[in-house]
């Protein structure tokens, strides 16, 4: 197996990653990304040619979160997606409460 280098950095919202770049940034095989896009739990557009997929910074953050849950808890992709979605919802609700002055 080929050694992969994990890339860290800040992705600007107007920049986009290719499938290969996203996989490399997460330290996974491209197939891992493709399976999650096709399952509807990661960005990209499954109906469009795989080579034309582009991913934004939010997709990179979500991919890394999914990967972390899958690895840390030995979770399948559906469970990982549910955990990440629930975490996102908790953060949104906390931000709303904070904005309303309720903590």
Image (tube, rainbow, N blue to C red):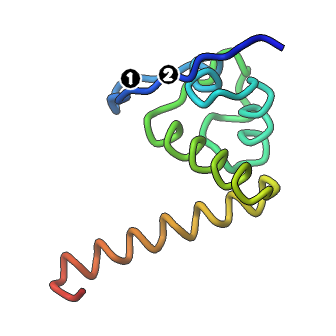
Q: Specify whether 94 is left or right of 43.
A: left
* Mark 1 neighbour class, 10 Å CA radius: few under 14, some 14 to 19, many 20 or more: few
Q: Kindly identify the residue that appears in the image at 38 percent across and 23 percent down.
A: 15
Q: What residue occupies the far top of the structure in this picture?
A: 2
Q: Kindly identify the residue that appears in the image at 68 percent across and 50 percent down.
A: 41
Quarter of the figure with the C terminus: bottom left
Marking on residue 7: 2
Distance between the Cα atoms at labels 2 and 1?
A: 15 Å
Quadrant of residue 79 within the rendered picture: bottom right
Residue 52: x %, y % from top left: 63, 17
The tag earlier along the polypeptide, 2 or 1, is 2
Q: What secondary structure is marked by label 1?
A: loop
Q: Kindly identify the residue that appears in the image at 44 percent across and 26 percent down.
A: 8
Q: Kindly identify the residue that appears in the image at 71 percent across and 33 percent down.
A: 33
Q: Is residue 28 above or below residue 71?
A: above
Residue 62: x %, y % from top left: 55, 46
Marking on residue 15: 1
Q: Is residue 6 above or below residue 66?
A: above
* Mark 2 neighbour class, 10 Å CA radius: few under 14, some 14 to 19, many 20 or more: few
Quadrant of residue 49 within the rendered picture: top right
């Amino acid at each position: 197996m080929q050694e992969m280098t994990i890339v860290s950095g800040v992705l600007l919202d107007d920049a986009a990653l290719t499938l290969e770049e996203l996989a490399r940034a997460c330290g996974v095989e491209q197939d891992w990304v493709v399976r999650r896009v096709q399952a509807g739990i990661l960005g990209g557009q499954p109906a469009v040619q795989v080579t034309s997929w582009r991913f934004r910074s939010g997709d990179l953050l979500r991919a890394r979160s999914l990967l972390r849950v899958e690895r840390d808890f030995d979770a399948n992709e559906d469970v990982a997606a549910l955990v990440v979605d629930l975490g996102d919802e908790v953060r949104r609700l906390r931000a709303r409460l904070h904005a309303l002055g309720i903590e």
